[in-house]
């Protein structure tokens, strides 16, 4: 599977008073990881949203396991990839490391959503397009930090 990596410098505003990352930041970075992976596959979200049928990739489930703390000024590497595809969904896996230490690992289950005609707020889950799926299943790693 295609992997996208990003480097994240832990800033003061990411931390709690103990200078440890405040955990909701991991969820923000996982979302960025998903968008980064789609871009690495050649499907930047900004371009996808130009298609009037595409509504987005809504999150339907997520979770996180914390292994070791990260602190102010640490530089983390986020690695994101699709772990598996369902009929209309895909499960993202996100790994946060500092050097060789696994700090946290999270997952997101997302659906590929299309607009519902005549309902500006409506959306429905549809299969991930074949071309998108093929690129996400390709082997390789892309550094999105560069």
Image (tube, helix red, strand yellow):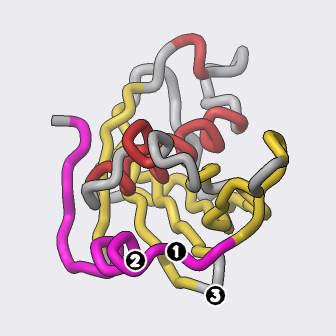
Q: Nearer the viewer, residue 76 or 55?
A: 55
SS at circle 1: loop
Is disc 1 in contact with disc 2, using a CB cutoff of under 8 Å?
yes
> Residue 41: within the magenta?
no
Where is 96 relative to 109, above or below?
above
The span shown in magenta is 126-145
Residue at 53% x, 84% y: name it: 84
135 lies left or right of 49? left
Q: Which residue is mark 3?
A: 87
**Circle on res. 76:** none
Element at label 3: loop
Q: Residues within 10 Å of mark 3 (few under 14, many from 20)?
A: few
Q: Residue at x 49, y 79 (%)?
A: 83
How many marks do you count on the picture?
A: 3
Question: Magenta stretch containing residue 141, yes or no?
Answer: yes
Q: Nearer the viewer, residue 95 or 141?
A: 141
Precedes in sequence: disc 1 or disc 3: 3
Say whether disc 1 or disc 2 marks the residue closer to the N-terminus.
1
Q: Identify the residue at image location x=44%, y=48%.
A: 48
Quadrant of the drawing holding the N terminus: bottom left
Q: Find disc 2 in the rendering and name its residue.
A: 133
Q: Which residue is mark 1?
A: 128
């Amino acid at each position: 599977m295609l992997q996208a990596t990003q480097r994240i410098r832990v800033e003061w505003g990411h931390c709690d008073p103990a200078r440890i990352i405040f955990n909701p930041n991991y969820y923000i970075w996982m979302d960025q990881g998903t968008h980064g992976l789609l871009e690495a596959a050649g499907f930047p979200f900004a371009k996808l949203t130009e298609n009037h049928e595409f509504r987005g990739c809504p999150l339907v489930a997520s979770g996180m396991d914390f292994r070791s703390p990260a602190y102010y000024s640490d530089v983390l590497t986020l690695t994101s990839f699709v772990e598996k595809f369902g009929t209309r969904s895909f499960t993202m896996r996100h790994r946060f490391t500092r050097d060789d230490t696994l700090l946290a690992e999270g997952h997101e289950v997302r659906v590929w959503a299309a607009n519902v005609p005549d309902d500006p707020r409506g959306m429905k889950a549809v299969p991930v397009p074949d071309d998108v799926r093929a690129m996400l299943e390709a082997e390789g790693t892309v550094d999105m930090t560069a």
